[in-house]
Image: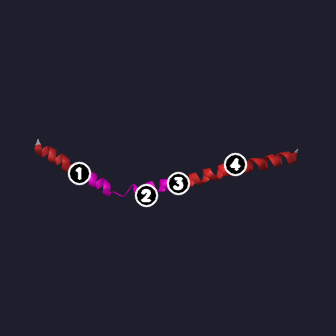
């Protein structure tokens, strides 16, 4: 029983160590962070330009009447 607990503890430690040293998922996380930054930039640009574009279309509609 004691040897089973010791070997289980050792294999868990090996798995944790291997997980912490693994770099395969880091690239995917970096791409996700870049994509979220681009999305925030697009959203803020659309929000800031929204009212001016709405006014532009209102002026065009008024001129066409």
Tell me, for residue 27, which label it has, or none.
Answer: 2
User: In which quadrant is the N terminus drawn?
Assistant: top left
Position of residue 24 in the picture relative to residue 8 (left or right): right
Tell me, for residue 35, which label it has, or none.
Answer: 3
Structural distance between the alpha carbons of marks 3 and 4: 22 Å
Q: Which residue, as the protein is rendered here, is positioned at the far top? A: 1
Structural distance between the alpha carbons of marks 3 and 1: 34 Å
Q: Residues within 10 Å of mark 4 (few under 14, many from 20)?
A: few
Q: Are marks 2 and 4 in contact (CB under 8 Å)?
A: no
Residue 14 position, x and y percent, is 23, 53
Q: Are marks 3 and 2 in contact (CB under 8 Å)?
A: no
Task: Give the mark, 1 or 4, whose residue is nearer the N terminus.
Answer: 1
Position of residue 16 in the picture relative to residue 32 (left or right): left
Q: Which residue, as the protein is rendered here, is positioned at the far right? A: 65
Query: In front: mark 2 or mark 4?
Result: 4
Position of residue 52 in the picture relative to residue 33 (left or right): right
Residue that appears at 74% across and 50% down = 53
Structural distance between the alpha carbons of marks 1 and 4: 54 Å
Which segment is the magenta one? 16-37
Task: Give the mark, 3 or 1, whose residue is nearer the N terminus.
Answer: 1
Residue 27 position, x and y percent, is 43, 58
Query: In front: mark 1 or mark 2?
Result: 1
Tell me, for residue 13, which label it has, or none.
Answer: 1
Residue 11 position, x and y percent, is 21, 50
In this figure, which residue is indicated by the disc labeled 4?
Answer: 50
């Amino acid at each position: 029983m004691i040897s089973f607990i010791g070997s289980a503890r050792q294999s868990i430690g090996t798995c944790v160590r291997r997980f912490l040293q693994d770099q395969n998922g880091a690239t995917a996380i970096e791409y996700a962070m870049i994509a979220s930054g681009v999305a925030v930039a697009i959203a803020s640009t659309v929000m800031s330009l929204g009212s001016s574009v709405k006014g532009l279309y209102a002026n065009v509609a008024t001129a066409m009447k």
